[in-house]
Image: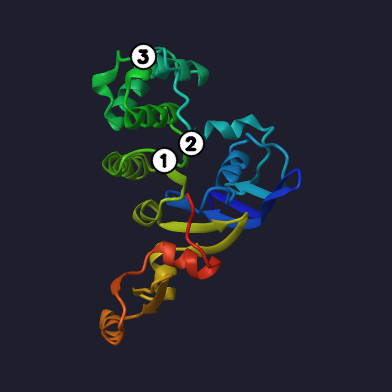
């Protein structure tokens, strides 16, 4: 197991942000935390990357006890925060060089790592461009590239596509897949986008109000509920019913005297069935 977490708890004053969550991350997989804002996703990332030092529970990295005071673990992780934190007045190349220096990369090794990261992220043509002049998607690519300079074994991505338009978001998904497949890097991402978790993750933990409400492979979580959703549009609400076959769902729809439609079950249906509400953003 790459990461093992048992009974992780964190309180901020009167607010219990994490309420005894447990999960594991396997080597080489794309693993996702899915949940609304305030679910505890970012708090978990900050604990696992040493930014929050006080917590309760047990964390193991590759079987070894984790402590944020042990700096050696930072050599094996890369972190992409939720918000853009590029040095805006520096060029793409200068941003990358600064982080190479922080990781002790100099000379030929530095040039090799920068070249490889530029190729992976598609930023080759923007080397001399100031970061402040990059689009939102290009800034995210720069931040991801920066986190890969020291060749981490685990990459943490906190809401990597938040604020990006759908086309740019999909291009970021391709980049994340490439990092996972081409570099053999374990990817731990958080998201509130249903489709993002479904498209990228081999396994997902659904988090709500600091608790794990479900975890497993996306397809297994959906099939436990049903394969098809019938949305029934009443005047004051939308009702959902679940069926294992499309034919059953269509037969039920034909028996109704109100508008309805049939679609495939998604992870938001799973969240709704477990919590009674939809994922809020």
Q: Position of residue 176 (x, y in %)?
A: 35, 42
Q: Quadrant of residue 135?
A: top left
- Rounded to the nearest angstrom, the CA distance separating label 1 from label 2 is 8 Å
**Mark 3, other Cα within 10 Å: few <14 / some 14–19 / many ≥20:** many
C-alpha separation, residue under disc 3 versus residue under disc 2: 21 Å
Q: Which residue is mark 2?
A: 82
Q: Which circle marks residue 162 in the picture? A: 1
Location of residue 120 (image quadrant) = top left
Q: Is residue 110 visible?
A: yes
Colour approach in the figure: rainbow
Decide: is 239 above or below 53: below
* In-image side of 52 versus 183 (left or right): right
- Residue 45 position within the rendered picture, expressed as x and y whole percent measured from the top left: 56, 42
Q: Residue at x 47, y 20 (%)?
A: 99
Query: Residue 66 or 138: which is nearer the viewer?
Result: 138
**On the rendered structure, is 98 left or right of 44?**
left
- Identify the disc placed on residue 124: none
Q: Along the polypeptide, which appears first: circle 1 or circle 2?
A: 2
Of the numbered discs 1 and 3, the one sitting upstream in the chain is 3
* 82 vs 109, nearest the viewer: 82
Residue 15 x/y as whole percent? 71, 48
State the residue lying farthest toward the left: 125
Find out whether the residues at labels 1 and 3 contact each other: C-beta distance under 8 Å.
no
- Which residue in the protein does label 3 denote? 91
Element marked by disc 1 = loop
**Is disc 3 placed on a helix, strand or loop?**
loop
Q: Residues at badges 3 and 2 in contact (C-beta under 8 Å)?
A: no
Above or below, 202 relative to 222: above
């Amino acid at each position: 197991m790459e990461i093992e977490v048992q009974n992780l708890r964190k309180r901020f004053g009167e607010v219990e942000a994490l309420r005894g969550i447990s999960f594991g991350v396997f080597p080489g997989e794309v693993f996702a935390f899915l949940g609304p804002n305030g679910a505890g996703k970012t708090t978990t990332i900050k604990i696992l990357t040493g930014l929050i030092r006080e917590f309760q529970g047990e964390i193991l990295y590759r079987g070894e006890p984790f402590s944020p005071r042990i700096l050696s673990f930072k050599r094996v992780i890369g972190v992409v925060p939720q918000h853009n934190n590029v040095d805006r007045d520096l060029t793409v190349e200068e941003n990358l060089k600064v982080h190479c220096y922080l990781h002790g990369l100099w000379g030929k090794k530095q040039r090799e790592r920068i070249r490889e990261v530029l190729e992976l992220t598609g930023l080759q043509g923007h080397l001399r461009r100031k970061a402040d002049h990059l689009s939102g998607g290009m800034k995210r690519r720069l931040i991801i590239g920066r986190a890969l300079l020291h060749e981490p074994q685990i990459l943490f991505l906190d809401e990597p596509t938040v604020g990006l338009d759908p086309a740019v978001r999909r291009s970021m998904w391709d980049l994340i897949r490439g990092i996972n497949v081409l570099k053999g890097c374990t990817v731990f991402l958080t998201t509130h986008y249903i489709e993002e978790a479904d498209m990228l993750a081999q396994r997902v933990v659904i988090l709500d109000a600091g608790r794990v409400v479900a975890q497993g492979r996306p397809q297994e979580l959906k099939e436990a509920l049903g394969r098809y959703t019938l949305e029934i549009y009443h005047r004051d609400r939308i009702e959902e019913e679940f069926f294992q076959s499309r034919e059953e769902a269509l037969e039920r729809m034909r028996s109704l005297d109100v508008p309805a439609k049939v679609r495939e079950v998604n992870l938001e249906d799973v969240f709704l069935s477990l919590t009674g509400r939809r994922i809020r953003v």
